[in-house]
């Protein structure tokens, strides 16, 4: 049912009256039109109250018309698609849009928290810091209660079903802002042959022209806009991004931009690009630009008078926007309050739309310029040298009190006149949107005549790739903005080395303006700390008095005052109130605004959804997945996967009815008693060759590489220069100057980079070539007393007996008809062979191994059994039993350290700290009770007892139940551990009594190593 | 995100590179001859200057070559990329810093 829209004008606006759209707010049904924002549609329906303030719970209405809106913060959509914290002024109305106010529980109309307004006196700056600090241990309780009462909307409870995407783009010129300056800058750049991206956060280009009735070259300004957009659309290298908010200006001219994609392309100002259809809800553009033109316009400032937060107090420019762009009337009886000329235009707009303007209250004794004269002509009373000292009305403005003003903000005034009104349009001057300029490292200058911070260019321009243009560059009239945009566009293409196209600056009418007057705090009937609240930041309820209180309490720096008073902390990031706040701070400190300066501008410029930031990197695309050549066989066998780095490795191979522990016990016993097979393909594999390879590897590895005979394998470790174990693996000498190195699964890339670092930077004179073979070759480990018999059964063209093919050697062979390298190495301590084979043979080989193994009751085993088997032998895993603070001496690997040569990290092993007797050393642990499997990471303590703090003497690094030993085993790092064998320590388990454990050798099984050497 | 010029591949986004710390730290030829303090100086102590900084970068997701970059630690402007040893493009024959310059990165041929 198309409910009446009582505040909708019959004609005009950029809305489509033939397309009514039904929507709801807090469950109540309304109707608006295509082209509306949620804010304009609410105004059309006479909804004045849209939220409650953050701290004081005061009723609030719509204040602005765009990104600066602090009050009308909505929760849009339902269920998994709901999105919090959207300003109603930027929500395009859609059919069946469901919105909720977020700041009023149980309802915006009746808010329990409004009682805090009653206690507003005690809720001054830093209230939370002061009140809830004591006792300190209660903070957890305080915080919970405070968070409940803040109500910043709700995150969806289930995964977002919508798609988001990221787009990378390069361009010659990025123009941020599609108002008059941005449009003409983009036009000249595009005509000159530059690749251009023009972005604007609105759904339509035009910027300030959308909100007025300006003329360009004697015709309506929007005709000019339409002409420029139509031309740009036809230029192939020009990308137009309406609904595209530039969020951040990052290092080296990298910019991020969030584009809201429209589902319904029939809407006005639909996405104009031909190449990309909207599949995603939002799209993050990552743009590298050669030149950037910032033409984001300016924000109107409010004025800080008493009760300036009442619903019905709006920015003058927003009032004009609602009239011209959306054809809605925010009120019927208006008063305008200003310290500059621009608000006179709003008064004229109101009068032209049939609204009675009771008065223009102008703080300036001398009044305004040409526009003021026009206002008088149409019969609007102009009160000069006066201010609004207070506002009446609670849920809606009812009237204003007007006082004469002497010119001193801090003196009290007496109101003499009261005027009834339901709309108060306010203008405190204009602040250029310098956010991106500042993010890019640009400085700001205080302009004392226009009373604003504007981009400082002169000294830095030579070095910068960005330029500002138009209102964002401190230009005020439309004519100046067009000229400045043309200049910026022309200079940008010239800097790119292109011939700038000649364009004549379009001409707009402009009225002579009288200068703005400083009015940072409007005087009231009582002094600044006792008068009714004068709000600076509406979203955070920061008042003039709060800032003055912060100064009285000793705050001096603008960044500190910001954090203490929460000035500029909201979703609007202080777009409305920051400059006013800094001016009040400057007055309280007795400094100039330039001396106080601004807070730091940081990305993002406007709020962005998590979905946009994440883009496609969700679910299965969150992290790359690496699968071995045998993966499909493991999947078919039903093996659960363990993610190691990005590799998906089979964790264990359960048979029917088996859990992890049963499967692992069976797999381990198979290896110990017969034979098992494991996919070890994820090990890092590096081919190293070249005339200097021995010299190079001698410097990298700790053992004597040069002494390795052809065909020999050796266990090797590499250390960081700090002497700490970095990686380990088996290496094999395949030729005089040819080695094959393996690394840990997780450390493969780092190890290769480490080798390359030294080779390329420190020893470039060495001729060595390193090639990663990790994916080209697969590795099948066959382990157990029957492994030799299994290989013989597969058919091998070389003898496999101990004398022909001894432990720690490598042989080329044809196995089961396939060429392979066989390594006699063992990570289980059993007789074992590692079959290294080209990855395209690997799956066939794996199947043949399992087939042939059937007679030996072969068990494929996964990472869990591998861990148990190696721990039974005391073999470490780098990164599990070490953590970057463990030396080879700590691990008992002195036998690996050559005395005859230097190697990376060797000198560090002689540092005093590495020689300390109480360093944590690798030991084994046995639980006295023969059944407690200690959780990995468990802290070890010397004795039980309640005396705190309890000194910790070590921690458990690996811990399993050993099936073949039938008791738990653990590896641990214990202070001075090697000298403490036989000692009793206690494992501190949370929630239970400490468990006594005995320090033993880390080798639990076959301590002499006989089983692998048969 | 920095735009870094690899001497072999040209300008690329920072995400293709990994950082390797301060350049020009030569490994002592005879570590055993150093006192603990001297070794610690090589191992742990770095200049951390405010302003121009010569540092190592690895084009780890590209050609995998290590090279040098002179980057200003305040403005992040990159004056130049250079080879860490003789023989390649941008070889660091004259180690003098590049003056001025508008572009973020300059590759020397």
Image (cartoon, coloured by chain):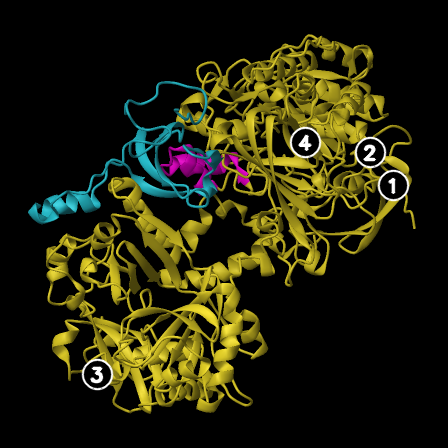
First in sequence: mark 2 vs mark 1? 1
Residue range in magenta is A542-565
Question: As rendered, which of A379 and A910 lies closer to the eye?
Answer: A910
Which chain does tag 4 point to?
A: A
Residue A475 placement, left or right of A785? right
Label 1 Cα crowd, 10 Å radius (few <14 / some 14-19 / many 20+): some
First in sequence: mark 3 vs mark 2? 2
Which chain does tag 3 point to?
A: A
Residue linked to disc 2: A328
Helix, strand or loop at mark 3: loop
Q: Residue furthest front?
A: A797
Question: As rendered, which of A588 and B72 lies closer to the eye?
Answer: B72
**Chain B, hue in figure:** cyan
- Do pointers 4 and 1 mark residues of a single chain? yes
Which of the two discs, 2 and 4, sits closer to the camera?
Answer: 4
Which chain does tag 2 point to?
A: A
Q: CA distance from mark 1 to mark 3?
A: 89 Å
First in sequence: mark 3 vs mark 4? 4
Residue linked to disc 1: A5
Helix, strand or loop at mark 2: loop
> What residue sits 51% from the left and 15% below the top?
A448
Residue A709 placement, left or right of A118? left
First in sequence: mark 4 vs mark 1? 1
Asked if labels 4 and 2 touch by Cβ distance under 8 angstroms, the answer is no
- Do pointers 3 and 4 mark residues of a single chain? yes
Q: CA distance from mark 3 to mark 2?
A: 88 Å
Question: As rendered, which of B77 and A670 lies closer to the eye?
Answer: A670
Q: Position of residue B74 (x, y in %)?
A: 36, 30
Residue linked to disc 4: A200
Magenta stretch: helix, strand or loop mostly: helix
């Amino acid at each position: 049912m198309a409910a009446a829209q009582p505040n909708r004008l019959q004609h005009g606006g950029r809305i489509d009256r033939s397309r009514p759209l039904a929507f709801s707010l807090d469950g109540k049904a309304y109707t608006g039109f295509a082209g509306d924002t949620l804010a304009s549609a609410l105004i059309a329906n006479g909804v004045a109250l849209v939220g409650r303030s953050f701290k004081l719970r005061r009723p609030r209405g719509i204040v602005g018309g765009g990104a600066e809106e602090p009050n009308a913060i909505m929760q849009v959509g339902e269920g998994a698609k709901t999105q919090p914290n959207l300003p109603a002024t930027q929500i395009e109305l859609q059919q069946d849009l469901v919105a909720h106010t977020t700041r009023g529980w149980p309802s915006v109309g009746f808010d329990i928290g409004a009682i805090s307004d009653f206690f507003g006196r005690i809720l001054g700056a830093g209230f939370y810091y002061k009140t809830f600090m004591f006792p300190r241990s209660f903070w957890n309780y305080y915080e919970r209660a405070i968070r409940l009462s803040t109500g910043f909307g709700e995150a969806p409870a289930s995964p977002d079903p919508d798609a988001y995407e990221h787009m990378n783009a390069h361009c010659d010129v990025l123009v941020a802002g599609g108002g008059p300056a941005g449009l003409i800058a983009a036009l000249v750049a595009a005509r000159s042959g530059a690749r251009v991206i023009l972005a604007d956060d609105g759904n339509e280009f035009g910027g300030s022209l959308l909100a007025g009735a300006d003329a360009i070259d004697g015709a309506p300004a929007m005709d000019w806009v339409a002409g420029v957009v139509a031309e740009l659309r036809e230029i192939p290298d020009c990308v137009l991004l309406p609904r595209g908010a530039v969020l951040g200006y990052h290092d080296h001219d990298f910019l991020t931009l969030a584009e809201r994609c429209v589902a319904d392309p029939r809407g006005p100002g639909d996405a104009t690009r031909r190449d990309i259809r909207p599949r995603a809800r939002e799209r993050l553009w990552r743009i590298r630009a050669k030149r950037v033109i910032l033409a984001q316009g300016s924000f109107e400032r409010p004025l800080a008078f008493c009760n300036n937060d009442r619903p019905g107090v709006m920015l003058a420019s927003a009032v004009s926007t609602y009239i011209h762009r959306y054809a809605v009337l925010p009120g019927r009886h208006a008063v305008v309050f200003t310290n500059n000329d621009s608000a006179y235009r709003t008064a004229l707009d109101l009068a032209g739309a049939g609204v009675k303007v009771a008065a223009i209250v102008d703080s300036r004794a001398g009044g305004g310029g040409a526009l003021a004269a026009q206002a008088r002509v149409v019969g609007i009373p102009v009160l000069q040298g006066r201010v609004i000292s207070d506002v009446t009305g609670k849920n809606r403005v009812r009237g204003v009190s007007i006082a004469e003003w002497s010119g001193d903000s801090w003196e009290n005034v007496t109101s003499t006149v009261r005027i009834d009104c339901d709309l108060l349009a306010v203008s405190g001057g204009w602040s250029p949107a310098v956010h991106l300029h500042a993010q890019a490292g640009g400085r700001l200058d205080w302009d004392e005549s226009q009373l604003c911070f504007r981009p400082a260019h002169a000294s830095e321009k030579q070095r910068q790739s960005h330029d500002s243009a138009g209102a964002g560059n401190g230009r005020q009239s439309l004519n100046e903005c067009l000229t400045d945009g043309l200049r910026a566009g022309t200079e940008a293409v010239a800097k790119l080395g292109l011939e700038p196209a000649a364009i004549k600056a379009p001409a707009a009418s402009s009225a002579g303006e009288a200068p703005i007057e400083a009015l940072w705090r409007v005087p009231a009937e009582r002094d600044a700390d006792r008068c009714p609240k004068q709000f600076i930041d509406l979203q955070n309820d920061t008042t003039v008095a709060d800032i003055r209180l912060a100064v009285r309490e000793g705050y001096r720096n603008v960044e500190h005052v910001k954090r203490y008073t929460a000035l500029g902390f909201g979703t609007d990031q202080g777009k409305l109130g920051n400059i006013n706040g800094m001016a009040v701070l400057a007055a309280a400190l007795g400094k100039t605004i330039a001396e106080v300066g601004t807070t730091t501008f940081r990305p993002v410029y406007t709020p962005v959804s998590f979905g946009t930031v994440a883009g496609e990197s969700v679910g299965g695309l969150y992290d790359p997945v690496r699968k071995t050549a045998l993966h499909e066989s493991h999947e078919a066998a039903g093996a659960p996967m363990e993610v190691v780095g990005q590799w998906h490795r089979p964790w264990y191979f359960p048979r029917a009815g088996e859990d992890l522990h049963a499967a692992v016990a069976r797999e381990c016993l198979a290896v110990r008693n017969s034979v098992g097979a494991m996919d070890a393909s994820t090990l890092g594999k590096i081919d190293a060759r070249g005339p200097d390879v021995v010299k190079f590897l001698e410097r990298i590895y700790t053992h004597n590489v040069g002494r390795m005979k052809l065909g020999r394998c050796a266990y090797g470790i590499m250390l960081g220069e700090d002497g700490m174990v970095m990686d380990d693996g088996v290496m094999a000498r395949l030729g005089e100057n040819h080695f094959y190195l393996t690394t840990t699964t997780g450390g493969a890339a780092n190890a290769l980079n480490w080798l390359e670092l030294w080779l390329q930077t420190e020893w470039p004179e060495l001729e060595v070539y390193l090639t990663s073979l990790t994916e080209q070759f697969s590795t099948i480990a066959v382990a157990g007393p029957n492994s030799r018999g299994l290989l013989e059964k597969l058919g091998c063209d070389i003898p496999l007996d101990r004398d022909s093919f001894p432990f720690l050697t490598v042989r080329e062979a044809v196995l089961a008809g396939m060429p392979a390298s066989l390594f006699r190495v063992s990570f289980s301590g059993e007789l074992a062979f590692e079959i290294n084979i080209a990855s395209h043979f690997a799956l066939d080989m794996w199947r043949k191994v399992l087939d042939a193994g059937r007679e030996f009751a072969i068990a494929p085993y996964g990472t869990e059994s591998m861990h148990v088997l190696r721990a039974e032998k005391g073999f470490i895993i780098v990164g599990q039993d070490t953590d970057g603070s463990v030396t080879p001496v700590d691990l008992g690997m002195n036998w690996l350290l050559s005395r005859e040569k230097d190697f990376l990290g060797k000198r560090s092993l002689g540092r005093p700290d590495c020689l300390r007797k109480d360093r944590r050393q690798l030991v084994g642990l046995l639980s006295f009770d023969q059944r407690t499997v200690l959780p990995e990471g468990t802290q070890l303590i010397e004795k039980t007892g309640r005396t705190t703090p309890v000194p910790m003497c070590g921690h458990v690094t690996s811990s399993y139940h050993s099936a073949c030993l039938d008791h738990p085993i653990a590896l641990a790092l214990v202070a001075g551990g090697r000298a403490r064998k036989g000692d009793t320590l206690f494992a501190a388990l949370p929630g239970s009594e400490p468990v006594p454990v005995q320090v033993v050798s880390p080798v639990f099984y076959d301590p002499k190593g006989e089983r692998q050497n048969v | 995100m920095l735009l870094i010029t690899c001497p072999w591949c040209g300008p690329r986004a920072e995400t293709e590179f990994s950082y390797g710390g301060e350049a020009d730290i030569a490994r002592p030829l005879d570590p055993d001859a150093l006192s603990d303090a001297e070794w610690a100086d090589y191992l742990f102590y770095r200049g951390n200057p405010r302003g121009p900084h010569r540092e190592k970068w690895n084009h780890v997701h590209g050609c995998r070559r290590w090279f040098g970059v002179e980057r200003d630690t305040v403005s992040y402007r990159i004056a130049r990329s250079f080879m860490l040893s003789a023989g390649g493009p941008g070889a660091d024959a004259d180690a003098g810093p590049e003056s001025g310059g508008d572009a973020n990165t300059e590759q020397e041929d």
